[in-house]
Image (cartoon, rainbow, N blue to C red):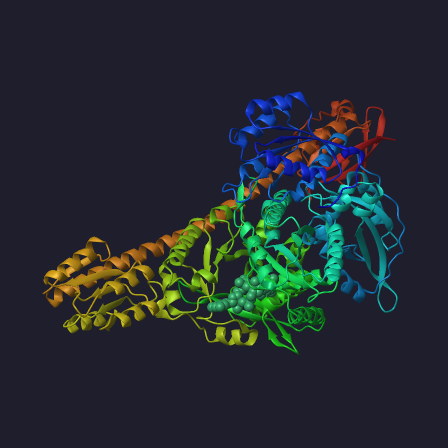
Amino acid sequence: MEQFRQSDNFALLRVLLVEANEKDAQRLLDALRSGGHAINSRQAAGHPEVAEALKAEQWDVILLSTSLPDLPATEAVDLIGEQAADVPVVLTVERGSKTFPLELLEAGVSDFVFKSNPTRLLAVIERECVRVRLRREAGLVEPMLESQRRADLGQARFFQLATNTPECYWLVDAKTQRVTYVNKAYEQIWGRYVEALYADNQDWLRYVHDEDRDAFAEALKEFRQGGMDMQIRVQRPGDSVRWLHVRNFPVRDEEGKVISIGGVATDVTSQVAEQWKIPYFAHYDALTALPNQMMFYDRARQLIALAKRKRIPLGLMLVDIDRFREVNQTLGHISGDEMLRQVAGRLSGSLRESDVLGRLGGDVFAILLPDVANEEQAGIVARRIVDTLIMPIRVEGQDVFATASVGIAFFSRDGKDAHELVTNAEIAVAHAKANGRNNYLAYSADMHHGIRERLILETDLRNAALRKEFVLYYQPKASCANGHITGAEALLRWNSPRRGIVPPDQFIPLLEETGLIVTVGRWVLEEACRQLKAWQDEGIGLPSVSVNLSARQLQSDSLLTDIADTLASTGLKPGCLDLEITESMLMQNADTAIRTLSDLKKMGVTISLDDFGTGYSSLAYLKRFPIDAVKVDRSFVRDITADSDDASITRAVITMAHHLKLKVVAEGVETAAQLALLISHHCDIIQGYFFSRPLPADDLKSLLLADTRLPPNLLQSGTRYPMVLFVGVDGFDDVLDQLQRDGHRVCHVQYVDSAIQWLSGNLVDVLVCAAPSGHFDPLPVIEQAIATQPDCERILLADSKQWNRRSVARLSSGGLVQRVIHLPIESETLSQAVEEALGRRQISEEFSRLSHEVEVVERQLMRIEDERQRLEAENRELHAQETHARRLLQEVMAELPWPVLGVDECGILALINERALELLAARGIAPGVPLQELLPEVGDFSGICTLKAGNSTYTGHWRACDFGGNRIGHLLVLEEK
Ligand code: C2E
Ligand code: CA
């Protein structure tokens, strides 16, 4: 256990132990005493004793057991809330207790520790005491001054450094002063995402401490070309304050011209804290009350020295919370912090007392495991850690499921010092994540290869952008109504001289991480628009092109101008450009996203929601966003024919989307069976390998020139012939012939397997199955038809055999077939039955076609109505502004010492101030009268005029009045000569 340095504030600690078990109470007190505090404690277990203790004394902290026999913890929390609301409460939890007290954490208790391992307790209490004290005093420590040499780095060295250091580095364009690069450490130090800074250059100012903000903003202006060297405080979301040492310096090109300004911010909180003798800040992480990075490394050095001396093993484990970023983005920083706190508690509860747990920053925890010698032993701990997180974590009323990826390294096999061990454990974490997260891996030397590859890839990518090695492929989308190509999605490829054509999933994540995506994304947009316009000019009919946007692009404040400029420079109509964005991008900052999308829509471009179904929002929630289409993710389409759940989800999505007046595009359609099913579910558009893979521009052009379409046999009614499938039906050849003569398509198969195959590749309107017999069981065919083509009419023939009657009755009473025809029958009767079924199908197809058309019209009407309402609102606002402006004008005019007249655009007097009224009363001026008729000498609203009134002569000055860019009238100001 770490020793705290004693500070005045913590010399005496008054602890109320709400605890029934004597031994547990003792163990908790021992843990506290190890910090060098003098403890004043009292133990109470029942309602009256606790109430009495709360009344009798002032406590610094209350330790509340969650397993009191006579006092439920919720009741105790209420009692404390009533009598000592601002005293921090820390729960003490039995390891293995079945119900974890999630609701109490929500009800405002500060933290929890496990009784079996109270190593965090002291730090938790110190943190809470600091928090209470800070809240009371609201006093802050003055930053210390420390001069450091200024760095002058070349851009290349800068990037190298920036990627791998804990300092926050950034680059600002010398000319525009926009942030062009910031490394990941910004997120650690500022507690904000780098995207936020790219999107808004003022973002970092917002989190600078109130007292330092103005000075920092001033310094940013003053040292636009470098030379800043100052210390500021950052108030991170949540409540911790960090002290930063900030410097900036010019970055020059080869000719010595300053092209960028580099900046670096170093977190010096611990030095400051050291100076001010705040042991808590110096050694413990404020959020989780775990040893911080500095202290963890300190302990690692000690344990490594011990391991060396005594030749005992030592393991080091890194625990990285999976998708923590998403939690932060969807639920906010406060919830993210709460989640980390709870994870810290659970982790410490799953370790031995001799293990050292620390937080290295962000969502990364580290553990030193003395005596853990091999993967097997470490695996037991790692599994326990992964398991301990299985229970949901309740933050702000929501259950969040945390999973972790764990990397393990051993001294001295995988590293001779703490840094090397941590670095290698990090590599193992990266591999564990790549293996699908929520698991653990021990480091091995060959893992390095992947990391080196990544570095080379990053360098190559930077060059690729410069050498114009990116190309666009186009994947056509086809209409399910008529089979025609309705558009194409532009998909980025990297034509690398060394690697060949590289697919985007191998480089887009890196482009995003490095910020290059903004530049490359802009190129994609321009190239796609240019290409489509070129085809349209050649007379090749491709209605629209879709471009994928990345999160950074959507957040970039130049997106709107980029798109407007691209449309203007290429001459492409806005309606021909479709932008694809994903749901998670919308969630990152929903309000801003809604605004950006609305502005884009006003421009006339359309918006599609990509990868729909993979996130967690429902379509009803997405109603808030102004989108035109949803793209059902290919993971649903893939299993649509095999998995009836996926089929019904897809059907529900389609119905719901249509209800919301959205178009539905199905992605990743690879087989005729998938297409048939999607068409029968009324999907609007499909995209996928079945119709075409993504193609180079020239190949897509050929496809367009050849007027390639979806196969007509799969299309919706109206464009294909009706289809009847007979299965195992013998002796009715004349019926089959007749149907064919009548223009229907007929397929006759003998076996169940062939029928199922046929159903998977063709739309069938009427299915006729022979009577069940010893050799023939129609049930699988009927079930397949129901699952994949639910609208198909199903007819079953039946004979009079006893057992047959039973199975036929089962099929018909279960609603699996619509009609049973008992044999023997005349051909005519069967023919008639099939015709009737075809008729019903036709009517229902016609009905759905009409409903679909109605939906399309409704969609358009809704859009027109939206636009009308928007214009009306704009108009109302303008009107209100105008009225307001007029009123203001009148007030100002009344005060003016000169006579002033105002006329509207038609020359009718609209405004007359007091002085003008006095002066010109004799000439009969009044509002509503044409000015020219009363005062012809004032001329036609321009220049200077002369006017005689009473005994004086006046010079009149005409001024035009504009409002909101429109001319609203003129003012005539009269000045006595
Ligand atoms: P996405 O937006 O979901 O794009 C569809 C992906 O599905 C494409 O992969 C396409 O080739 C693939 N695909 C289409 N039909 C089928 C099919 O029938 N079966 C299967 N298995 N796959 C099919 P691609 O081209 O590798 O692109 C991957 C992702 O990279 C895209 O996913 C998109 O998120 C991203 N991406 C591609 N181009 C750009 C771009 O210009 N900008 C941005 N920001 N992202 C891009
Ligand atoms: Ca896409």
Would residue 483 be found to the left or right of residue 540 on screen? Answer: left
As displayed, is residue 271 above or below residue 261? above
Q: Quadrant of ligand 1?
A: bottom right
Answer with the quarter of the image where residue 333 lies: top right
Q: Where is residue 180 drawn, in percent x and y? A: 74, 58
- Percent from the top left, x then y, of residue 957? 80, 36
Q: Which of the pair 614/856 is nearer the observer? A: 614
Q: How many marks?
A: 0
Task: Place residue 127 in its image quadrant.
Answer: top right
Please indicate whether residue 689 sits to the left or right of residue 55 in the image: left
Q: Is residue 517 visible?
A: no
Q: Is 232 in front, or is 931?
A: 232
Q: Nearer the viewer, residue 632 or 746?
A: 632
Is 172 on the left-hand or right-hand side of 717? Answer: right
Residue 416's spot in the image, x, y percent?
A: 74, 64
Q: Quadrant of the C terminus?
A: top right
Can residue 124 be seen from the camera position used here?
yes
Residue in the picture at 16% in, 73% down:
733
Name the spot of residue 963 as percent of width and height, x first: 69, 40
